[in-house]
Image: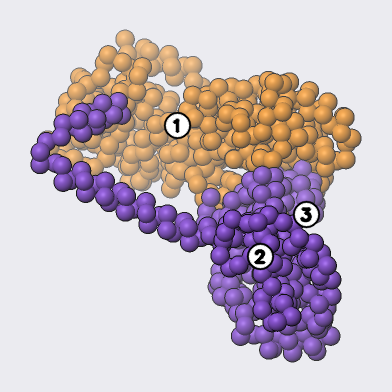
Amino acid sequence: MSTATRTAPARTDRPAPGTAPVAVRHVLSRIGRYVFLCAVLGFFALPLLWLATAPFDETPTITASLPRFTLDNFRALLDNPYALSSLLNSVYLAAGTAVLVVTFAALAAYALSRVRVPGRDALLYGLLLLSSIVTGTATMVPLFELAFRLNLIDSRLGVILILSGGLLPAAIFILKDFMDATPTSYEESARVFGASPLQIMRHIVVPVVRPGLATVGVWAVANVWGNFLVPFLLLRGPEKAPAAVIMYTLYTEGGQADLRLLSTFSLLYSLPVALMFVFVSSRYGFRFHGGIKR
Amino acid sequence: MSAITLRELTKVYPNGVRALDALDLEIADGEFFALLGPSGCGKTTLLRTIAGLETASGGRVHIGERDVTALPPGRRDVAMVFQDYALFPHMTVQDNIAYPLRIKKVDRRARADKAAETADELGLGALLQRRPGQLSGGQQQRVALARAMACHPQVFLLDEPLSNLDARLRLEARTFLKRLQRELGVTTVFVTHDQAEALALADRIAVMEGGRIRQVGTPTEVFRRPANTFVAGFIGSTPMNLVDAEVRDGELVVAGTRLPVPEGVQVTDGEKLTYGVRPEYLDHTAEPASGGLRGRVVVVENLGSFSLVSLDLQPADAPAGDTPGTSVQVVVPEGREPAPGDTGWVVPRPGRSLLYRDGELVTPEATPAVPAARTAAGAEQ
């Protein structure tokens, strides 16, 4: 280590005539690399910058610019009858789905991890493959039909059930990995001390896999929060529509996208998920493992 | 009070593996009992069946007066310490130790007191608020023991209690464990694959193979008089020498050397037997000795205060250079090691060699040891 740091400067201090072009090329390649990185960074940062500035601008455009500061946009948004309630609707849907997904995925993953089921892995991968179809566009017609027959049109429960169904396989897959990593001797030890299955679940399994439960919960909320298609098709009126659907209605009378409302609403729409992520991350320190062994 | 009785205990796994085969065993109250055997012999299954973590396919398990065969683990009044200790990582040492009491619905204050008291007994007093992840292997083991002790079970079950510790710590923990068991006086069954551990710790040992018990006895019995060639080969840090022997003219012919048949053994001429003697009970000399087996030194392994010498036996009547493929090992005290390639003789000490017919011991119980030793001393002078 120490010899390396000592010899490295000595080598550059000795600019032999033949090495100059090499050094120049080195500097140029470095400049090129940083320019490229800046371009990529700018590509991803600009929309976020727009999100930070546009809501406070009197006349927002689709470009990010220094705002002429105002809070009028927020006042205008509050005048919209559905804006705030839609955020609450989103919370209902997200919370309901997250609770269902975490509960059932935890139970299923525990069982799949502990009980030998023939063809278990095939079952898991099959479910995982199919789940991307369940909430996808292709199955929207049969799902609508199903919801209609079950009298679940224009019902939050219907949306929650369908979204949960779509998320469960991946959630089970992620949680099974956490369950597998928990030694069975923990549970056996508790059993010998006389703990009931429910006590084992409450005292041992849930606390041990808590980071996994937090991961899946956050992931479910984020998924529901961003889902447009399912609530758009299944919920009829704007009273129950979540934020993702209401955003679609923010137009001016002229039929143009109302950038003032849209930008302001976008900011409000993205804040809860970002805050939740920070909160859960600091509380449980979850890491996304998704099928990867720790 | 809390003896363990097993009657024709059988465990067949769904895949058809017969882990326990109609096993009978009695473990006395307060005894420190070892289940010893190679991996896959069923010793862990036996322990888990006593704990109730495996259900017996047949037979009965009694603990004390109670038949616990059909009871769930929690109602058998046993405590088990797992090989990986199974300490709950999200609980402090105190909560871990108090967990059995929490299940028994002891109130929080009494639980904390009991945990602190138990922890103090095991020298864990300063660690109560730590998490298992912050403890050393030895400390984790003691926490696991404390947790098992906290609920005052009738029986302790220990699965490979020392195997997760490094070599130095293992010796320390062995002494600690034996002392603790003596002080508590609770019937304790432990599983090990390490014969030295079993000999050192246990009051009695059951040596298992293929789901059956091959011998039960005190460490001395099992070491001195292995009931069969399996136990003979398994017990002892250097396994017993087992050499083919044949009866000729009322004498035993072992690798071309004639040896007397031990007292009390009925033999017929031409019969094939196995002659067994421990390396510790063989004396090595560089000069021809009567009643000694001749061999060529192949390997000398230095083991500190003594060396383990392997010789390829060369029958006296066989041509030189012919190796019949039988080798014996002999323990030689330090400073008297032969060099590889030397020719040497090994002389069995009287009264220490055993005869096996079809793998089962036929040498009867001692021929009193003292006169035998005296004649041996006399013969040497």
Q: Is residue B126 above or below residue A263?
A: above
Looking at the rendered structure, whether the residues under marks 2 and 3 are on a common chain is answered as yes
**Which of pointers 2 and 3 lies earlier in the amino acid sequence?**
2
Q: Chain of mark 2?
A: A
Chain represented in purple: A
Q: Looking at the image, which residue sits at the far top?
A: B381
Describe the element under mark 1 as helix, strand or loop. loop
Q: Is residue A194 left or right of residue A142?
A: right
Foreground disc of the pair 1, 2 = 2
Which residue is at the front of the view, B141 or A27? A27
Please give the residue where the numbered disc 3 appears in the rendered image: A197
Query: Can the viewer see residue B27 in this picture?
Result: no
Quadrant location of the N terminus of chain A in the rendered image = top left
Please give the residue where the numbered disc 1 appears in the rendered image: B236
Which residue is at the front of the view, A181 or B102? A181
| Separation of marks 2 and 3 at Cα, in angstroms | 61 Å
Q: Amino acid at mark 3?
A: Pro
Foreground disc of the pair 2, 3 = 2
Chain represented in orange: B
